[in-house]
Amino acid sequence: MSRMSHINVIEKYEEHRSAIHHLLSSILSCFADPKMFEQNQHELIEQLNSLCNYYPFISLLYLLDEKGKQISTNVPGSHFRRSPKTGRGTDRSNRPYYLKAIKSDSVVVTEPYLSSVRRELCVSASIKMNNEDHSIKGVIVLDIDLATTISFLTGDSKRIHFEPYFKAIYSIIVTGLFSVAFLLLYLAAKECWLVIHPLLTNDENKLLPFGVVIYLTLALAIFDLGKTTLEEEVLLYKDILRHSSTRRTITRFIAAIIIAVSIEALLMIFKSALKESGEHIIQAVWVILAAGFLLLSLAVYIYLGSKSEVMLLKRKNSKEFSS
């Protein structure tokens, strides 16, 4: 369960665009005050910290004058203390959050962009402040960490704190699976020697090679299971709120099991044929039928899961269109 990539963040932003814009507009509307232009750095930090207690996704606060020049040092949010406290005197007159704010009397929210300070996707909410004579006093800007905002809105903030522990446990499990797979490969190598040695002494045993194949098949299945667990739970980002992510994980696990079961069934058939007694042939047929049933069940699961997700998306789009 890795951190969301930029593509994941943008996809989630598109899903929750309206909610994000409304939330940021309400926050900055209540927070912005012309008196902030008379406050010193320490007062700005205290004011922003009080806001970050409720909204931990706020990364930066800074003030611009009427010409778009930054007149305050970057004030980092309480959860983003590593952000550099620089920026005073920077010309931001060509930035969208300034250009849009100057032309509007309400809060404006930009589209996602890569922050030059934190190198993460963010959006900026800004609002124009006027003097008593209605001349422009300046612009207040809040930078919002987009990934953290999405986690806050979807109720995923608490789970993220436990994610490193989940990764550590999954990593231990994967290490154990890989260890078993390598042990099986070692046993397969020993079996190979037992196969080669009789050939050198002209003492053939037709069933000996099947032991090697069995060890290799088990090693393949266990290694594939460990690889799937490593990719799905440690390396890749998985959106647990989206059905397609869960369906992808289940599909990969069941596919690995079907491959292993099918290979074992074929081995049972070959061994029965070599013995010329037909022993275990019925059991092998039942194993093949079980693999076929698993494959059919997996196909039905994938079909119904994808169909239900399409229905949910259509329903959501229809609601957004009607609203």
Image (spheres, grey):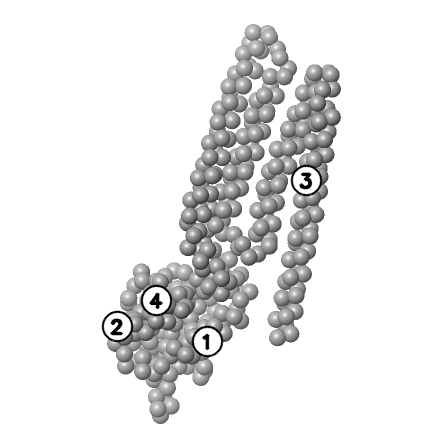
Residue contact at pointers 2 and 1, CB within 8 angstroms: no
Q: Earlier in the sequence, mark 4 or mark 1?
A: 1
**Residue designated by label 2:** 42
Residues at marks 2 and 3, CA–CA distance in whole angstroms? 64 Å
Disc 1, SS: helix
Q: Which residue is mark 1?
A: 25
For the point 50% across and 74% down, the residue is: 22
Whether residue 239 is situated above or below residue 33 in the rendered picture: above
Looking at the image, residue 162 lies above or below residue 320:
above
Residue pictured at 47% horizontal, 72% vertical:
23
* Type of amino acid under label 1: Ser
Can you say which quadrant of the picture contains the C terminus? bottom right
Amino acid beneath label 2: His
Q: For the residue labelled by badge 2, is the local secondary structure a helix, a strand or a loop?
A: helix
Q: CA distance from mark 2 to mark 1?
A: 25 Å
How crowded pointer 2 is (Cα within 10 Å; few <14, some 14-19, many 20+) is rated as: few
